[in-house]
Structures are given as structure tokens and as C-alpha cells.
Image: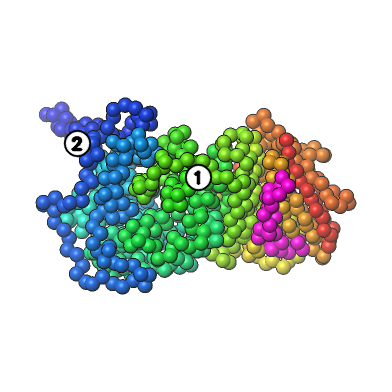
Amino acid sequence: MKRLMFLIFLLSCLSFLNIGCSEPDPIVPDDTEINGGNNDDGGSEDNGNVNPTPPDEFIEEPNDPSADPQSAYGLDYSKLASAGHPRLLIDDEGFKSLKKKVTTDKRLNKTLYKLHTQILKRAEKIVTENRQFAVPNDHYLIVDNLVYCSYAYKMTGQSGYLTKAKADLLKTCRFGAWNPSGLSIGEISLAVALAYDWLYYDLSLDERKLVHKAMVDKGIRPMYNRSYAATIGNWNSICLGGVACASLAVYEKDKDIAVKQIEKAIKENLVGVKGIYSPDGNYAEGCGYWEYGTAWEVCFLSCLEDIFGQTAGIKETPGFMQSGKYAIYSHGTMNSQFSYNDGGGSADSPFITSWWFAAKNDDPSLIYAEKRMLDNGVYSDVPLEKEGFRLLPAMLCMIEDYDFESKTIAPPTDDIWQGDGEMPIVIVRKGWNFDESDVYLGIKAGHCNTWKTSATAHSHMDIGSFVFEAEGVRWSDDIQRPGYTAWFDALSKAGSRSGDTSQSGLRWDTFRVSNLCHSTIVSSTNDGSVAGKLHSTDYYVDGNALIDKVIDSDGRQGALVNMTEPMKGQVARAYRTVELVNGNELVVTDEITALSSMDCKLEWRIFSVSSSSVTDSEVVLTKNGKKRTLTVSSSNPSVTTQYTTWPANKPTGDGWGVLNFAQGISDRTIAGWTATIPAGMTVKFVTILKK
């Protein structure tokens, strides 16, 4: 009897998964199948549950009988009332078209097929591992599970995906709340909206009522009572965009609150998008946060455009549609990124939102790096919890009508890309081979404090810093922020928080985000005009460093950064020019005028992945058998320089140590030189890093 009961239990588990047993295997073939073979990817183009026609026994939840409200933004809500399901990001015809392209016509749509294959591999892993979440703060898992499994079911019809998606959907909707004060509310609202919309005719009446009520009570109403008008950063896109998509999903059931939230989202998102992307598309929080926030933003805008034929002017905001350029130029030369602020690390990763920008701008160059990573298997190695990657099924649905195969996917042709705005940057790139022949220089200006927008809650004291790669070595690096959990805990225990970027905010007692841990200039001189400093070397956080000039002539490419404001109370004037000369040599010119009242004690630092050694005449950086020498010359022979290195960990003294947080860095070196400039004197220092 025990054996019989065990057998029944085992069979029930297999029935639950329903993958690899009673139905065809998931569509997870090798990419080589696009060049031959007879695998039909799970059946003909009519396989799968893509028919929105309700089954005979389907019982519809009654609609809100009230009239369609008027829109302040010219939206015709009668279009939404008659749109049916699915309607978010893709409709029934879109699903049918996409299925045909990645099954019977896969050899004509190799790019879409490869993206589809990666999605199904990931969906299968979610189901076979039966990945579970416990609380709304597990929103990474919730989004992954719902979006991938809902897509996989729509494309294959295999009930194991539906079983997993439905179970997680109902579990999510039974949570007491979706953490309205955090990002969970936006993330969960989008994921639940997509699952509800795509699986609409596979949910019972009671299930649809439960999900509908949860979206209203746990997403839409709480968000309506919060303002994000002053939130200029990824939170604006994620929270407003995600909840607005939920409002679009349930509109005909709850017209009043749905319209109120849609209109509110548009109003506050218009402000947010302008602050985030204008005028050129570079993202103040860094490229990692660009991928995160922009993925949610384009989902919101695509829903508006598909249903209403317009986005109320959001998409037309200067800089937004140009931000795909920012993303492609943020990819470094050797599995690296132009990292600054909290939004990036040295290691590269896919920017899946680039697919949307390439399709909407009809500019295949924007996915040159993505296509390479897709073909090289990088997409297969992305961790399940990767933020933006969780929306890859959504991206594929939004680009299914773009013909990538008829386009030549070549790299951008410009050597220089400039982005102004909140955090100005200049990027110089020579070559797109992603090997030792490429050279990369990224230069950052901007400010540190929330004097302008909340985006600087992620800021570092990295003003005037640069990332430099050549010969396959990242000679000048920008290290990633500390892990949030331990860091936030330490800040909280010290009575502070990560977003406190005021002059005395304990964020600046974190070595990794200080100017001592970046490739820039610092001074310990202080005339007392800046109050509240934790350390003498800290920048004036309200000081804004502008890019005064972009240089592109006579074999010199780079930018002139005006560092005077951030170095208030330390120098009278500071101008920094960072250039790539003759395509390979880094030249940094710092013109410093000391205060009239006191000498300027200056430190020139380069933060590098290499090892360093110092002599009286140079600094030598070495990595992987490559070597570069760093030398400096002074315009005034009486002002001498001394080459030196610094420990890559938190200093002692000078106010350091208020925050009890381990901050040592074992795999980096900090080298450079020091000098003392007499009061009132102007000196120009030219530092060269060459082979």
C-alpha cells in the first residue's frame, strides 16, 4: 500500500509539472537548428493557446457600465474598453504572428528565434526548479516567474507553464500588500497585469475577480495616493509605469480609479522622463539603472501607443528615444561597462531594452553589442535574478513586427558620444571588435547632491573621473558600489540612509563612493567656506561640474571638465581635460589655481585593476603581461610632484570611520602623484599614461 501511495504521489507531481512527460518537450533546441533540421518547435503555427475567443463555458466578469471618461491628454478610452485580451504589449494577432516566425518561419527570423529560445530555456528552468517566493519583496522572482511562464504557455500551450504561472499569480494576489513604499508595487503590478491579460481566458471567473481586485487594492489605489512627480530616477518609471499597466489591464472593470491612475501616471511620468533622459538620453544613475528603469518605461509607453496610438508626448520627450545610443556606447571593450554612480559595475551584461530602441528607431546599430552577446551565448548565462532581463519576453512581444534579418547590424560609426543634462558624460570609442584592438575612454562630470533631482540618491563623488581601456586592460576603473543589504544596514544603524547625499550624509563615509576611490583629483585644503564636510577631501556636494568643451581634432579626442564648483573652498579654479591622443595614449591636463589665502595640497589618483610600482620618475602599471607608464610634468618647475600609491581601503584619521562598514578592496590599486601649489599660483599639470 505504501508503494502504491508513493507511486500515486509521484505521478501527481509529474502531472503538475507536465513538462517532458505527457506533452512535447519545451522548445529548447540548440541554436544550430535555425540552419537545418526538422524540429518544429512544439508543433505547427496553430499549436498553443493563442485564440482569444472565449470557450463556451467562459463566464465574463461584468464590466463597469459607466461612460468612458474624458482624458486630459487626448486618450480615447473607448478604444481601451473594446480592446479585449490580450492587449498589453501584444494582441492575439501579434502572438500568432510571433509564433509563426519562431516556429515554421524560424529560418527567416533567426534573431527572434534565438531570443525566443532563450526565453523558453529560462521558463523551463523556472518550472523544473519550481522557484518559490515568500513575500512581496521577492519581486525579482515574482516578475521572472509570471512573465516567463505566461509567455511560454501562450507560445507552446504546455500546461506545466500555465500551472506554474497561475499558482504564482494567485499566490501573489493573496499577499496582504505589495509594499507600496518600495519598488515591489511597480514590479508586481506589471507582472500581474501581463499574466492576467495574457492568460485571461485560462483563468476562472473567481480567479479573474481575485486578480482584478488585487491589482486595484494593492497596486492602483495605493499608487494613486503616492506622488512620484519629484522622483527623477528609475522609481518613477517602475512604479508609475508598472501600476499604469495594471490600470490598463482592468480598465473596463473599474473605469474611475483606472483612469485616475493612468492620467496621474502620465502627468508625473512626463516630468520624470524629462528629468531622467533630457536632453541627450544619458542616465544620471548609470547604465545599469538605465536598463532597469527603461525596461519598465518602454512597457508603459508601448501599452499606451498600441491601445491609443500615442503616448501623451512622453515618447517625444527630448533625449528619450536617443537613449539607445547611450546604452550602446556604455558597453566597454572587454566584457566591461562605463560604470559610474551606483548604476554599473566593471563587468558587462545585456541591455535587453536596446532591442526596443533598435526596432522603434529603425537603427540596428543599437543592438550591435546585444546581437554579439546573443550569438556568443551570453544571454544563456544571465542570472535568473538579473533585473532588466526579467522582461525579455515583454521585449520580444514588443519587437515581433520588426524584421531584423533584412537589416545590416553594424556598429555605430561615430568615435565620440556626448550626453549633457544631470550627469554629463563623454565617451570616446575606437573600434568595435571587443578585443585588444579597441580603445575606450569614458569621462564623467556632474554633481553629488539632490539639489536638482532625486536621481543623485545613487551618486558617487566621481566627478572628473574617467574609465580607460586599451590592449584588453582596464587601466582606469570605477568600482561597483557596495552590496546594498549590508551597506544599508550599516547606514541605518548609524542613523543615516543611502539616499542622504547632503554634505554631512554618512554615504560619503563609504570609501567606495568617495573621491579617494576614483580616478580624479582631490585636495585636503579647506578654507571653511563649505560647512558640514565629513572629510577634508570631500567635494562640495552642491557644486556642479560642467563639460565646457568636447575635443575632437588633431588626433585628440576627449573633454574639458570644469571642476571649480565641486572643489569650492579647496581651490580658486580647477579645469580638467581628459583626452585620448593618437588613438591610444591617455593625456590628462589639470590646470589648478590655488586659493589666495592658502596653499593647495593636491592628489592626482588613478584607480586601476592593474598592479602598480613607483620610482622617482614614474608610476608603472602592469596587468596580464601589459605595461603602461604614468608620468607628469608641471608648468612651474618650482612646483614639484611626488609619485605614490595609496591603500585601496578606508583611510584612518580625517574624520573617517563614523560608519562601521568594511570597505577594503583587494583586487585594485590606487596610484598617482601629489603636489603642493603655493597660494594664488596657477599650475598646469600634464599627466600621460602610455605604452
Coloring basis for residues: rainbow
Left or right for 576, reference 355: right
> Residue 135 at x, y = what percent?
34, 52
> Is residue 207 visible to us here?
yes
In which quadrant of the rendered view does residue 539 lie?
bottom right
- Say what amino acid the circle numbered 2 marks: Ser
Q: Which mark is residue 15?
A: 2
> Residue 496 at x, y = what percent?
54, 60
Left or right for 453, reference 238: right
Kindly identify the residue that appears in the image at 42 percent across and 57 percent down.
297
> Residue 687 at x, y = what percent?
76, 46
Q: Judge depth for marks 2 and 1 and give the one in front.
A: 1
Q: Secondary structure at mark 1?
A: helix
* Alpha-carbon span between mark 2 and mark 1: 46 Å
Count of numbered circles on the image:
2
The answer to whether mark 2 and mark 1 are in CB contact below 8 A is no
Which residue is under mark 1?
365
Kindly identify the residue that appears in the image at 28 percent across and 47 percent down.
95
Give the residue furthest to the right.
638
- In reply to whether residue 325 is colored magenta, the answer given is no
Residues rendered magenta in the picture: 545-573
> Residue 86 at x, y = what percent?
26, 53
Kindly identify the residue that appears in the image at 42 percent across and 41 percent down.
406
Classed neighbour count for the residue bearing mark 2: other residues with Cα under 10 Å, few (<14), some (14–19), many (≥20)? some
In which quadrant of the rendered view does residue 162 lie?
top left
Q: Which mark is residue 635?
A: none
- Picture layout, residue 375 above or below residue 357: above
Of the 4 image quadrants, the one containing the C terminus is top right
Ranked by sequence position, the earlier of labels 2 and 1 is 2
- Say what amino acid the circle numbered 1 marks: Ser
Kindly identify the residue that appears in the image at 45 percent across and 54 percent down.
294
> Is residue 533 visible to us here?
no
